[in-house]
Amino acid sequence: MDPLVNPPILKIPKKRNSPRKKQQLQASRAIIAPPNSAVNSESKLGNVVGSDDKLRERFENMKLKRNKGQRDDNITSVTIKASIAIEGGTVRKKSVPEEWQKALNATFGLPPQLCTNTRVKGYKSPIPTILEDMRSMLRNINGFCSEGIFRLAPDKHHFDKFKEDISSGSQKYRECRNANCIANLIKVWFRDLPVPALHLVDFTQIASCVEKKDRVFASVLLGTLPEPQQSILKWLLDLCVEVTAQSKKNRMTPEALAIVIAPNLYRVPEFDPTDMQSGLAAMKKTKIYSKFWKSLIEWRFEKNKGRPEPGRGSICHSKVLELFVVESYCIL
């Protein structure tokens, strides 16, 4: 065989890792231990497992303290838990990492079922506490008599600060005395819902109701909504009734109120602004939703005549939120 034409194949032996190198490679891969293969050690932190380096270091330090400075090599994984409960209208958290505080204080963009709720007389389901707080604040500052309430936009800087106080869990938002800030926050809460409230009603039936100008039919459609959305929309209607009852002072009639409230309860699909047909269709849909909400306000106004204003009831203790971990550390 000619070595220039067919060179011989050289066999290079594989390099074997030392036991120490293998251990370092296993640690660097950060394999998540399966639930049944790990020895879980309970800590005082409740019901959540962390997932970042700071928590890993913290858990490691806890092990060292428990063993009086000596590392226990038999421990292969550590599961840390933290409990989160809603009680007395307040979220109670036990040893929850700072990184999760903002998520736990979230108020906007959540399904109603995940909000801190308050039991209010007259409604089948509890009402989000933040909404009931806003109504009480409007009453305390006589905000329902403020001209243009729900129509006038607040100062952007003040509103952003007001919303940030709520999202951060601060109680400073209760010091707000600006009726327009409070009213706008109620609209934003409904606007940020993952599923707009009126999307749960068939639009063809809403259009038929508007065409017939039938308030009773409108109330029937409202009754088809599932809970807690039905109770929350009835709460909003009662709020609108309180506003329109002061229409001589605030100049907000059912029609004027429907024009500014209804757009927060639905979303018009995006359309090409250069396409006149799609633009006209969107405008028509907006008018139908506004007229439908106006019919509901007038129906609720008649229904509530002679009845006392719905007031705040007891705090709802029906929900306890717990964060459960989907991963645990494998400590080598």
Image (spheres, helix red, strand yellow):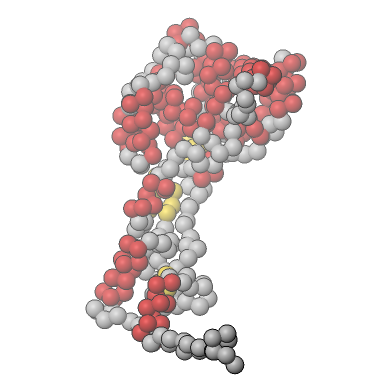
Q: Residue 153's spot in the image, x, y percent?
A: 42, 19
Q: How many marks?
A: 0
From the viewer's perspective, is 77 left or right of 305? Answer: left
Q: Nearer the viewer, residue 228 or 282?
A: 282
Q: Nearer the viewer, residue 71 or 20?
A: 20
State the quadrant of the C terminus: bottom left
Q: Which residue reaches farthest top?
A: 248
From the viewer's perspective, is 295 left or right of 132? Answer: right
Residue at the spot 50% in from the left edge and 88% down from the top edge: 10
Residue 106, above or below 162:
below
Residue 144, above or below 164:
above
Q: Residue 38's spot in the image, x, y percent?
A: 47, 76
Residue 83, above or below 267:
below
From the viewer's perspective, is 285 left or right of 175? Answer: right
Q: Residue 19's spot in the image, x, y percent?
A: 38, 87
State which quadrant residue 47 falls in.
bottom left
From the viewer's perspective, is 2 left or right of 60? Answer: right
Q: Which residue reaches farthest bottom?
A: 1
Residue 107 makes an appearance in the image: yes
Q: Nearer the viewer, residue 288 or 301?
A: 288
Residue at the spot 38% in from the left edge and 61% down from the top edge: 52
Residue at the spot 28% in from the left edge and 75% down from the top edge: 64
State the quadrant of the N terminus: bottom right
State which quadrant residue 283 falls in.
top right
Residue at the spot 48% in from the left edge and 60% down from the top edge: 324
Q: Residue 134's spot in the image, x, y percent?
A: 42, 29
Residue 296 makes an appearance in the image: no
Residue 156, above or below 46:
above
